[in-house]
Image (cartoon, rainbow, N blue to C red):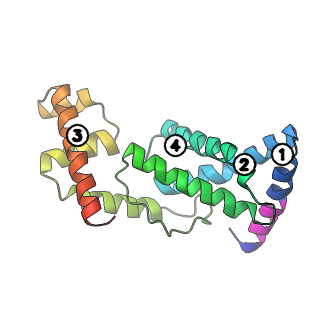
Amino acid sequence: MMDEDVRDLEGELAPLLCAALKGDQRAYALFLKETTCILRSMVALRIGSLPQDSQEDILQEMLMALHAKRNTWDMNTPVLAWIRAIARYKLIDIQRRRRLLAYVPLDADLKAEPGAGDVPAVLAARDSESLLARLDPRSARIVRAVSLEGDSMAEVGHRLSMSEGAIRVALHRAIKRLAAIARKDDI
């Protein structure tokens, strides 16, 4: 976003949140509506490779975090910085919990406009492939198919002539190995 756009958005959101904190439900609904657009673009930029329904689940978790922390906003500080900080940490928590394989640089510019390019997706794909290359070929194929491409365990099992249970075990072990690699490399 341009600096002017940020100032405009700040000037729009801060009064809405102030009014919401004083009990104005209409202002709070408008605040959440505008904030949803910001958060949706963050999710798309950071983990756009996930299916749309998963992205919406993450968006809802981020909105709930903002709702839970709404009373922590200091009216003397920029509301956008407060939103981004909470959303960023929530997104990191979600990624850890879901064990996403895409590397997310913590110092990435969160001000990028939606649709500003596929650079984060390209970087995430490159980093994912770099990690997967360190697994044995079968494990990498399982992780790629289930976690990145969204294939079912049954589909992958059929292709690899393995039972669904064996795919689950192999996936679990591969993800543990990837986590160990990522920790070792301090990713």
Magenta residues span 4-11
Reply above or below: 165 against 108.
Answer: above
Q: Secondary structure at mark 3?
A: helix
In the rendered image, which quarter is residue 163 located in?
top left
Label annotation for residue 171: 3
1 or 4: tag closer to the N-terminus = 1
Label annotation for residue 20: 1
Nearest-to-viewer mark from 1 and 4:
1
Asked whether the viewer can see residue 158, the reply is no
Q: Which residue is mark 4?
A: 55
Q: Residues within 10 Å of mark 3 (few under 14, many from 20)?
A: many
- Kindly indicate whether the residue at mark 2 contacts the one at mark 3 (C-beta within 8 angstroms): no
In the rendered image, which quarter is residue 110 located in?
bottom right
Q: Is residue 182 left or right of residue 169?
A: right
Q: Secondary structure at mark 4?
A: helix
Q: Secondary structure at mark 2?
A: helix
Reply above or below: 182 against 109.
Answer: above
Residue 107, given in percent of the width and then of the height, sits at 50, 70
Residue occupying the point 60% across, 39% down = 60
Q: Is residue 160 left or right of residue 12?
A: left
Residue at mark 4 to residue at mark 3: CA–CA distance: 22 Å
- Kindly indicate whether the residue at mark 1 contacts the one at mark 3 (C-beta within 8 angstroms): no
Residue type marked 3: Leu
4 or 3: tag closer to the N-terminus = 4
Nearest-to-viewer mark from 3 and 1:
1
- Kindly indicate whether the residue at mark 1 contacts the one at mark 2 (C-beta within 8 angstroms): yes
Residue at mark 3 to residue at mark 2: CA–CA distance: 39 Å
Label annotation for residue 70: 2
Q: Residues within 10 Å of mark 1 (few under 14, many from 20)?
A: some
Asked whether the viewer can see residue 27, the reply is yes
